[in-house]
Structure formats: C-alpha cells, structure tokens
Amino acid sequence: MIQYWQENSGQMINLMIQHAQMVLGSLLIAIVIAFILIVVFLRRENWLNGLMYFFSLLYSVPSYAFFALLIPITGLGQISAIIVLAFYSEYVLLRSFITGIREVDPSYLEVAAGLGMTTKQIFVKVQLALALPTIFSGIQVALASTMAIATIASTISAGGLGDLLFEGLQTGRVVPILWGTILTVLLTLICIVILKLIENIFVVDVPKQ
Amino acid sequence: MIAQIINYFQTSSNEYLVAVGQHLYISFLALFSALIIAFPLGYVGSKSKIFSGFCQTFAQVLRIIPSLALLFILIPYIGTGIFPALIALVVLALPPLVVNIILGFNEVPKVYTEVGIALGMNSFQLLRQVSLPLALPHILNGIKLALVEVIASASLAAYIGAGGLGNLIMLGLGLYKMQYVVIGGVSVALLSLISMLTFDWIIKRVKNSDQRNY
Amino acid sequence: MIKEIIKFNHVNKKFGKNEVIKDLSFSINEGEFITVLGSSGSGKTTTLKMINGLEKPTSGQIIVNDCDLKEANLVTLRRHIGYVVQSIGLFPHMTISQNIGVTPKLLGWDQGKIDLKVKDLLELVGLDSKEYASRYPTQLSGGQQQRIGVARALATNPPLMLFDEPFSALDAITRQNLQREVKELHHKLSKKTFFFVTHDINEALYLGDRVMVMNHGQIEQFDTPNKVANQPATNYVKRLIGTVRENQALWEDIK
C-alpha cells in the first residue's frame, strides 16, 4: 500500500484535484440553479411539485447510463460528467431547499408581516434564515452522494478517483482499489468539514439553557 | 444515429433481449436475496435501539463508499462473474431495505401493538395481523429504493463480467459505436423508471385500500 | 358463593429506580363494577396493566380468575379478558367487523359464528350492523369508535373487562352517554366484573359499586361511593371531595 503511494502520489493527487473539480463544480451549479428555481416558483406550488417529480425521475436513472447517454451530445470528458452530476445533485438539493422553506412555522411569517416586512425581506430574513440548517444538511447529502457517483465518471474518460478503481480492476490488484476508496472517502470528509465551517458562519448557534 | 439504432434492433434483437433478461434476472435475484436477509434484520432492529443505531450508521457509511468500489473490491478474492456481482449487489441493496423496514415497524403506533397483545395475539399473530400490514408502505418504499439502486449498480456489474445491459454500454464505449451506448443507456433508464413508477403505484394502492389517514 | 376474581398480594412495581406501586393488596369479587380513581402518576393504569400481564410486578402475587399470573399462559388469559383503552386502538386497516372478530378468530371460531356475534354485539352497543359492519374505523366518530372498542372487548364473552380511561378523550355529551350505557351494560350482562380506571371523580362515583382511590401507588380508600364521598378516610380523599364541593359552590354562584 505504502509502496503504491510512493510510486504514484503525484498522479493520485492529480486525480483527487480532478475529482474535487468535478464534484464541487457541479454542486455549485446545482445550488445556483436550485436557488433560482425556488425564487421564481416560490408561490407556484404545482410548478415546484412538477419540477421535484421531474428531477426525482432523473435521479432514478442509473448513473452509468446517464453518463453514457450524454456522450453523443457533449462528448467524453469532464463537461458531460459535470452536467450529469449537477442533475443528480439537483434532486437532493431542491428537495431539501423546498422542505426547509416549507417547514418554517407559518406563524413566524405572520409575525414578520405584522412587523411590516416586505415579501422579499420576509423571504430572505425569515424563511431562508430559518431554513438554512435543512438546506445545509441537503447540501451535505448531495456532496456525499455526488462524490461517490463521480467515481463512475471515469467510464467516460472524465478522470477523477474512479480511475484508480478501474486500474485496480484491470490489473487485478486490490491496492489501487483501496486507495481509490480511501481517497474518495477522505475527500468527502474534508469537504464536509469545510461545509460545516461555512455553515457555522451563516447559522446562528443558539446556546442551550 | 436513428438509422443505426433501427439497424441494431433488426439485426441483434436476440442479443438485446438476452441482455435485458440477464439484467432483470440478476437485479431481481439480488433484491430477493437481500430481502430475505434484510427482513429479519429489520424486524429485530425495530425492537432493539442499539441494533437499529448500528444499522443506521452502517447504512450511512455505505452511502459514502462508492458503489463502484464495493463492486470491484471483491474481485481479487472471488474473481469475476455473476456470483461476485450478486454478492456486491446484495450488499448495496441491504441499507435501504433494512433502514426502511426498521422505520416501517417503528412507525406503527404503540397503541396498536399493545391492543393486539391485550386481545391475546402471540408474537407471530401480532406481526402478521397488525405490525406487517401497518408497516407495509415504508417497507415497500424501501424495496423500491433498493430495486432502483440494484438496477443501476447491475449496469456497472458488466465491468466484473456479470453481463446485462451494462455490457452493451461498455461495448459501445469500447468500439465507439454510440448506438449501442444510447440503446443500452435508454434501456437501463427505462427499466429503472418503470420499476420506480410501478412501486409508486403499488404503494398508493396499498395506502388507499387501508383507508388510513397518512 | 362470592368468588374472588382478582387478588393482589403485596404487589410492588418499579420502573428503573422509580417505585410506582408500593405494597398493593386488594381483592375484587365477581360481578363488581370497580372504578379506580387517581391523578396521572398514581399508578392506576399500571395496576390495570398488571391484571392482564401487559406489565409484570417487580414482586408480589397477582391471581386472576384463580390463576396465579406467574404460572399462567398470558396469551390464553388475555383472550378471555376484555380491554378498552383511551386511544380506542381500533386497527385502521381492518373493517369494524374484522376488528370485533380478532379474538374469536384467534380462538378458531368459524366465520358464521363470528358474523353472528358481530351482529349481536353491534346491536348491544346501539349501532346498526348492516350499516357499520363493513366500514373502516376512520369513517366513524370518536363516540362510535369507542362503542366498537367496547364491542370488541366483549367478543369472547369474557368474565372480566378492563377499561383504561376509555372516555377521557371524548366530548362531554358523548362521555355522559357512554357512561350511562356502560352502567346499563354491566346490569344487563350479569356476573361480569368491570375494572374501570379514570381520573374523573364524577365518573368514578357514578359508575362504581366500589371506588378505589389511588395516590402515589397506594390505596387511599377502597369503599362504596357513599362512604368515599361522606366519610373520606385520608387527607387526600378529603381534598378530592373538596374540589367537587367547591365546583358545586361555583355553579350555585353562577345561577
């Protein structure tokens, strides 16, 4: 194991960076899109439900198939991968954004209106703020699952840590497979920690009595 | 592209059906085996907090580990082919099954199990007449999630020699015959969608026939 | 010959470190309507649950219908004890008819006999069997559901019926109607023993042949309603009766 690292560390780090690029890139795109969709369709329940169902159908499409289907359209490589990963994350993100916002106690909204806030202010200062914990938890789930799915992007030559897994498969050695797994999990955990730090900046920690 | 697709179906429809058959066979076999293991695990898990906590953690861990890694990791030890693939698929199917079976049984309001016992049911009668019917929606949901997961992973299992539609995609990628890729991809996607929609429908029927307020 | 149907001998019940029932001893005769009065935490529900073995005593002896519960087959025992609860507990996935027929089916009755019994019981609790037998519980009102709950408890004609605050969740008018009906039921069905737990003084004094007042897991007084109301044995009972007198004064003032 250690020997493998010593021989290939440069390449492994490269793959990690590729992997991170794919995942974080697609995640960011998905978050932005989710945000836009929510703002536009906040009042239109039916549209939101329709969008949710659409993305849930996409989510159930097996990743290998989805990656493959994009090739005729956007070719091999990272771009196809990022598009597919963004679609997958979209389902998880939309669901947690919507749940988070819907679960805000309506009495808070009433109070805010009673205090004289505009609709926009209520959305930003009350709904969004109170929904943040759920939203961040959704981002975490999307992050973890996208990290795992991104390994499959290796099948369409997008690079990433999946390459290590396939190398292990093709040479019949366990070591690259183990390294691929460990590094993926490690990368996931590092990103989750960073996410938690970001969350701490935005979410107020209420001291326990 | 369309011409190539039509050509494929005209010339190789047999192989296509074989691939679909293989894919379905291995998926359902894995699902069924996983269910046999998961059901007692889930039932016991709903009774013991420690055990259920263990199962939940295990499920979370499995979610972070790429399914691809799980598929490949056993190869150096038990080789390639349908059987190793089956093992990997069963392992992948277990978390959604166990978690949802535990959830299903835990969601049965305590009053119903208490009344059942007070009416003189023994454990088996309680399970069959009360707990199981009331836990069914969650259990069916778990089966749905597991099935979708298995169909998806079965397509990757082509890489470890399990056949199925993944083979078609893999072939297409290797030979750069995009029509194979598209046919394989769309077929798997359709299988997954049909399973999901079928189970959604079954779950809806079960809920309605129970006249329960959910 | 008066037969003892329930006997508690120095029963104790602990939940963890919490001693809920302390040295409880009493006996109940066949055919009595016993009401158990107490606030939450008094141990009244725990006592009831120990009669059909849903809870087991930490120490002490419980004899039900000449069976010592330690040696009895609880499953068989429960098939011959009626059980009615506050949350009613009708299985939502079974029809009214199926709900009532649960225990008879466990005893292996044939379907014809069960159907006949369901019809009789629905009539007994004042519901038209043609209309209600194939409906589902969620389609009925709270009062109707609880009537079915009582019918279900009577399905195997058990000698003993346990009621755990059965009417507390219902509105005042329905509650009063059901109280009258359950009292009549006890008269009609001779020799059945009713063990009825409640926190409502009026209900306890109205229904019971004898009233068991419980507090902190012990019996404060176990006597006829008359004696409990007019000769309260302990301070606790005095205070309880006091609350009723105060309410009476309030009603007088409002007039």
Image: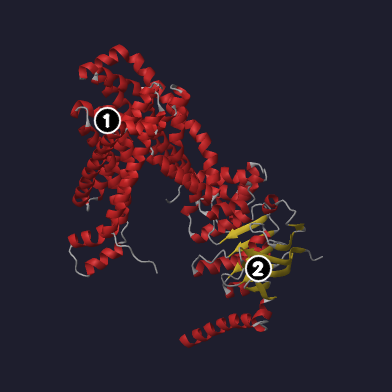
Q: What residue type is labelled 2?
A: Ile
Q: Nearer the viewer, residue A11 or A79?
A: A11
Give the residue at mark 1: A67
Is residue A61 visible to the viewer in this orientation of the structure? no
Query: Which residue is depicted at the point 32% across and 46% down?
Result: A190
Left/right of residue C119 with respect to residue A175 in the rendered view: right
In the picture shown, does residue A81 fall above or below C139?
A: above
Q: In the displayed orientation, state which residue is furthest to the top.
A: B11
Horizontal and vertical percent position of residue B195: 38, 32
CA–CA distance in space, label 1 to label 2: 66 Å
Crowd rating for badge 2 (residues with CA inside 10 Å; few <14, some 14–19, many 20+) = many
Element on which disc 2 rests:
strand
Element under disc 1 = helix
> Pointers 1 and 2 in contact (CB under 8 A)?
no
Camera-side residue: C86 or C99?
C86
Judge whether residue C69 can be spotted in this image.
yes
For label 2, the residue is C21
User: Residue at the spot x=75%, y=59% of the render?
Assistant: C65
The type of colouring in the image is secondary structure
Q: Residue furthest right?
A: C1
The part of the image, by quadrant, that contains residue C182 is bottom right
Residue A202: x, y in percent? 26, 58
Residue A118 located left or right of residue C106:
left
Nearest the camera: A78 or C134? A78
> Where residue B156 appears, x then y in whole percent?
36, 27
Subunit under mark 2: C
Q: Are marks 1 and 2 on the same chain?
A: no
Question: In percent of the image, x 54 and y 44: which residue is there?
Answer: B43
